[in-house]
Image: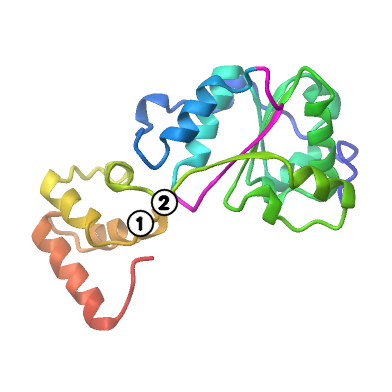
Amino acid sequence: MSAFGTRDQLKLPLSRDVPAGAAEFVRSGSNAGAVEILERWPDGGDPVLAICGPAGCGKSHLAGIWAERVGAIALHGAEAGLADPLELESRPVLLDRAQDADDVTLFHLINLAQSGGGALLLASRPAPRAWSTTLPDLRSRLDVIRTVTLQEPDDAVLAAILRARFAARSITPGDDLIDYLVRRIDRSATAVESVVERLDAEHRPVTRTLARQVLEARDATGELFD
């Protein structure tokens, strides 16, 4: 277990270190409910909130937008145990990969938020009630945390992820290619990264024809982009 804040302490990022991205976030039916809640929260309600969903659904992106809006301190997984509790008191805090933080750190972060003046946003794939813990007091807290869930990427979100991954490789895909891939690959960021990497590796113009050839080869070998 971590002795929260007693090891070599992590230099906390300023709010400007949290990546911007509201302009790039695609609002759709798969995330609209979570977007509406985070646009208002914390609004005088419960100071602890969890945002959950499958890989590639946009939860970390959305949580980062919230952190930028409220000036939150951003922590990540097990690194949270290095934070100085005095710097977190009465501050909004984002804990991404929250299920990777140790039990003692989670317990103290929740207590800090609930002691008044602060807010804690937990981002993870599974909901807090599904996390493992050996601390009864933490178990009781995790089980009652308000949770909002993002669904797997729908067409609009998947298309946006595809465009972003292609752009990172300086590739400008046509709309027909994006539409073709959205209908045929697994709905995950991992699948997107895999197919974009495979298309780029062909060192040919990235077109719908090339995509069809790559996906047909995948089908023939039984390989899956997931």
- Relative height, residue 148 to residue 181 (above, below): above
- Relative height, residue 142 to residue 37 (above, below): below
Left or right, residue 8 beside residue 49:
right
Per the picture, the main secondary structure of the magenta-coloured stretch is loop
Left or right, residue 99 beside residue 108:
left
Is there CB contact under 8 Å for labels 1 and 2? Answer: yes
- Secondary structure category for the residue under label 2: loop
State how the image is colored: rainbow
Q: Position of residue 77 (x, y in %)?
A: 68, 46
Q: How many marks?
A: 2
Residue 6 seen in the figure = yes
Q: Position of residue 168 (x, y in %)?
A: 32, 43
Left or right, residue 66 beside residue 79:
left
Q: Amino acid at mark 1?
A: Arg
Residue 7 sits inside the magenta stretch? no
- Name the residue nearer the viewer: 199 or 41: 41
- Relative height, residue 93 to residue 40 (above, below): below
Residue tagged 2: 152
Q: Position of residue 172 (x, y in %)?
A: 18, 42
Q: Quarter-wise, where is residue 43 in the image?
A: top right
Q: Quarter-wise, where is residue 72 in the image?
A: top right
Residue tagged 1: 187
Q: Residue at x 36, y 25 (%)?
A: 23
- Secondary structure category for the residue under label 1: loop
- Name the residue nearer the viewer: 117 or 175: 117
- Label 2: how many Cα within 10 Å (few below 14, some 14–19, many 20+): some
Q: Quarter-wise, where is residue 46 in the image?
A: top right
For marks 1 and 2, give the CA distance.
7 Å
Q: Quadrant of the C terminus?
A: bottom left
Instruction: Write down the region rendered in magenta.
Output: 44-56
Residue 49 sits inside the magenta stretch? yes
